[in-house]
């Protein structure tokens, strides 16, 4: 058994303690967490699952003789992982802002390809976390890119 497999229980414990802390502090008064708390939970669970699969595949690969992966495949794999991470983050933000209640039609958003409320808040960067239309539009954009890719 590899030393890497020892890290899985430690990371699992850390993830569960983090999620428990969020539930105790954020969910005590309201039924749902804020956008960033939900994104943090989704990222932690995704890292736990991804890390477990990564370690398992690494163990399986080291036991059998395998051909190394080409560099181009690795670049594409990392690009998809990056897009998937962004999708997970914006899924949590969209969920925390109840974005599904703002625009519930797809692929258009109430007959608009780009919602009229996109980037209307000042300062500009607030739109990414506090504007439900912007968060949902970005979430849909990255989801479409992932499905096309």
Image: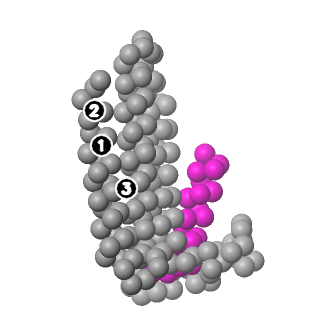
What residue is pinned by disc 1?
A: 9
Instruction: Please state the extent of the stretch shown in magenta in the rendering.
Output: 128-149
- N-term-proximal mark, 1 vs 3: 1
Q: Secondary structure at mark 3?
A: helix
* Main SS category, magenta section: helix
Q: Which mark is residue 4?
A: 2
> Distance between the Cα atoms at labels 2 and 1?
10 Å
Looking at the rendered structure, the number of numbered marks drawn on it comes to 3
- Pointers 2 and 1 in contact (C-beta within 8 Å): no
Residue 105 locus on image (x, y percent): 72, 73
**Which mark, by number, is residue 77?**
none
Among the two numbered marks 2 and 1 on one chain, the one whose residue lies closer to the N terminus: 2
For this rendering, which residue is in front, 65 or 71?
A: 65
For image coordinates 55% across by 78% down, the residue present is 98
Q: Are marks 1 and 3 in contact (CB under 8 Å)?
A: no
Which one is in front, 103 or 19? 19
Instruction: Classify 31 as above or below 80.
Output: below
Disc 3: CA contacts within 10 A as few (<14), some (14-19) or many (>=20): some
Q: Residue 129 in magenta?
A: yes
Kindly identify the residue that appears in the image at 31 percent across and 76 percent down.
25
Q: Position of residue 72 (x, y in %)?
A: 47, 30
Of 30 and 144, nearer the camera is: 30
As drawn, 17 above or below 10? below
Seen as rendered, the residue at the extreme right is 111
Residue on which the image places disc 3: 44
Residue 88 image point, x, y percent: 48, 58
């Amino acid at each position: 058994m590899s030393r890497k497999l020892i890290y899985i229980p430690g990371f699992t414990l850390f993830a569960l303690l983090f999620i428990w802390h969020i539930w105790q502090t954020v969910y005590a008064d309201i039924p749902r967490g804020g956008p960033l708390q939900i994104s943090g939970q989704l990222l932690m669970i995704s890292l736990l699952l991804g890390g477990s699969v990564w370690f398992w595949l690494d163990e399986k690969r080291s036991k059998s003789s395998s051909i190394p992966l080409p560099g181009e495949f690795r670049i594409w794999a990392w690009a998809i992982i990056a897009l998937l991470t962004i999708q997970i983050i914006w899924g949590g933000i969209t969920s925390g802002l109840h974005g599904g209640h703002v625009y519930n039609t797809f692929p258009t958003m109430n007959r608009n390809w780009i919602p009229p409320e996109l980037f209307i808040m000042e300062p500009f960067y607030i739109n990414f976390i506090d504007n439900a239309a912007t968060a949902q539009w970005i979430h849909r954009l990255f989801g479409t890119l992932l499905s096309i890719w």
